[in-house]
Image: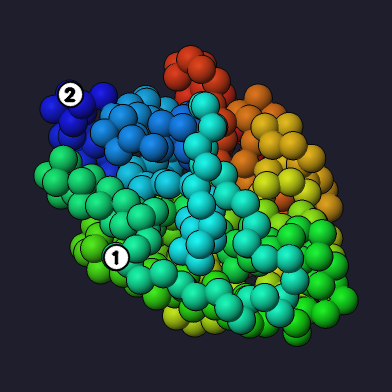
């Protein structure tokens, strides 16, 4: 969708209402439970290679989301450019293959080799330069009227696992996390430095927390994708991820964590991370190996200071009852029915039944 065909006036009116709900939800003066709908999108595939096509696709996605009733609307653009972005800053080459998003290959085989890794200067870092150029392009083409998030930022542990032989990396996470400190510190430093640079480029349009959630102007902290939560043991998480998440949380006023897969074994350790504001998980088969809502409810009961974002199909809505009963602060993100009229009626019935 070209911006000249985007319903900007309708968007701005809906966003004003959404932002008011968003602010009250996050500062504790509003509802304990937020319900939003997020239609499918494709801008995290091969289309991300081309900034013009990506913007058109994201505008279409936001326009589509506006057809669904949501407490907090999908409203921000994202300069998504692959999960290996920070690995590329240390020398990993982007590999484009057909209709897939870019991939990277490991750079080192063991922790000691991390000493030789250096972050490229921005003038030589093609992928981050493209992210910054994309932010400028989004701002210019939308007349500075739409919020923009950071690019999808992998957590320090996730990024390091892309840079080092995976088998050795995960063994060291469990047995010798201190050996990984130089590598994880370099990655963490890069995330902090270049997240700030992106924020400066975005300016007043900065929307947070970012990737894989509803974002707006009323929150603090940044979003990190930490999919290794599903793989790491609690001890490995506490030694080779938690300290670095806390550094990032301190730098940005909080941290929000997304992970695919089942990671209830790490939820207790995750909630002990200083500065954690929200974590995101799936509880039905819209994501492989989902989390048990009953087990999750036991873990988050009474955790009112940490938002739990749960993703599921609107047709699986009754699965949420244990989590609603737990008293946790919930940000519910439904994958809607393809027909907005049906999906909106299902959301109304869900609210009447449970909220």
Tell me, for residue 123, which label it has, or none: 1
Tell me, for residue 5, which label it has, or none: 2
- Position of 207 relative to 171 (above/below): above
Q: Residues within 10 Å of mark 2 (few under 14, many from 20)?
A: few
- Position of 22 relative to 143 (above/below): below
Identity of the residue drawn at 40% across and 37% down: 48
- Residue with the most extreme right position: 175
- Give coordinates of residue 93: x percent, y percent: 51, 52
Closest to the observer, 151 or 175 = 175
Where does the N terminus fall, quadrant-wise? top left
Where does the C terminus fall, quadrant-wise? top right
Of callouts 1 and 2, which one flags the residue occurring earlier in the amino acid sequence?
A: 2
In which quarter of the view is residue 65 placed?
A: top left
Closest to the observer, 3 or 253 = 3
Query: Element under label 2?
Result: helix
Query: Element under label 1?
Result: helix
> Residue 169 vs residue 85: left or right?
right
Q: Are marks 1 and 2 in contact (CB under 8 Å)?
A: no
> Residue 275 vs residue 253: left or right?
right
Identity of the residue drawn at 51% across and 17% down: 338
Using the rendered image of the protein, determine whether residue 130 is visible from the camera's viewpoint. Answer: yes
Identity of the residue drawn at 23% across and 45% down: 138
Q: Residues within 10 Å of mark 1 (few under 14, many from 20)?
A: few
- Give coordinates of residue 172: x percent, y percent: 81, 72
- Position of 323 relative to 301 (above/below): above
Identity of the residue drawn at 74% across and 60% down: 165
- Give coordinates of residue 202: x percent, y percent: 25, 60
> Residue 327 vs residue 140: left or right?
right
């Amino acid at each position: 969708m070209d911006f000249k065909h985007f319903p900007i006036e309708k968007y701005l009116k809906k966003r004003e209402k959404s932002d008011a709900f968003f602010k009250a939800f996050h500062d504790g003066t509003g509802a304990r439970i937020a319900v939003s709908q997020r239609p499918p999108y494709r801008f995290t595939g091969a289309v991300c290679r081309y900034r013009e096509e990506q913007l058109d696709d994201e505008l279409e996605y936001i326009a589509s989301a506006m057809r669904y009733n949501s407490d907090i609307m999908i409203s921000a653009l994202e300069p998504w450019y692959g999960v290996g972005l920070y690995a590329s800053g240390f020398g990993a080459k982007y590999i484009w293959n057909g209709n897939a998003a870019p991939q990277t290959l490991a750079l080192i085989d063991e922790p000691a080799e991390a000493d030789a890794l250096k972050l490229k200067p921005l003038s030589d870092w093609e992928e981050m330069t493209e992210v910054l150029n994309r932010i400028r392009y989004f701002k210019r083409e939308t007349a500075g009227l739409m919020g923009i998030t950071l690019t999808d930022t992998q957590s320090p542990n996730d990024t390091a696992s892309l840079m080092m032989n995976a088998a050795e990396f995960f063994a060291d996470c469990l047995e010798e996390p201190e050996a990984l400190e130089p590598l994880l510190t370099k990655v963490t430093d890069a995330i902090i430095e270049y997240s700030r640079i992106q924020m400066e480029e975005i300016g007043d349009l900065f929307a947070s927390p970012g990737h894989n959630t509803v974002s707006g102007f009323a929150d603090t902290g940044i979003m990190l994708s930490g999919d290794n939560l599903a793989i790491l043991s609690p001890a490995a998480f506490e030694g080779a991820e938690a300290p670095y998440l806390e550094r990032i949380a301190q730098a940005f006023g909080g941290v929000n964590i997304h992970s695919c897969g089942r990671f209830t074994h790490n939820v207790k350790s995750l909630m002990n991370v200083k500065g954690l504001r929200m974590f995101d998980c799936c509880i039905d088969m819209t994501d492989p190996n989902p989390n048990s809502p009953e087990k999750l409810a036991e873990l988050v009961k009474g955790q009112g200071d940490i938002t739990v974002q749960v993703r599921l199909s609107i047709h699986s809505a009754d699965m949420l009852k244990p989590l609603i009963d737990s008293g946790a602060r919930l940000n519910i993100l439904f994958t809607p029915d393809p027909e907005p009229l049906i999906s909106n009626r299902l959301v109304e019935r869900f609210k009447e039944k449970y909220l």
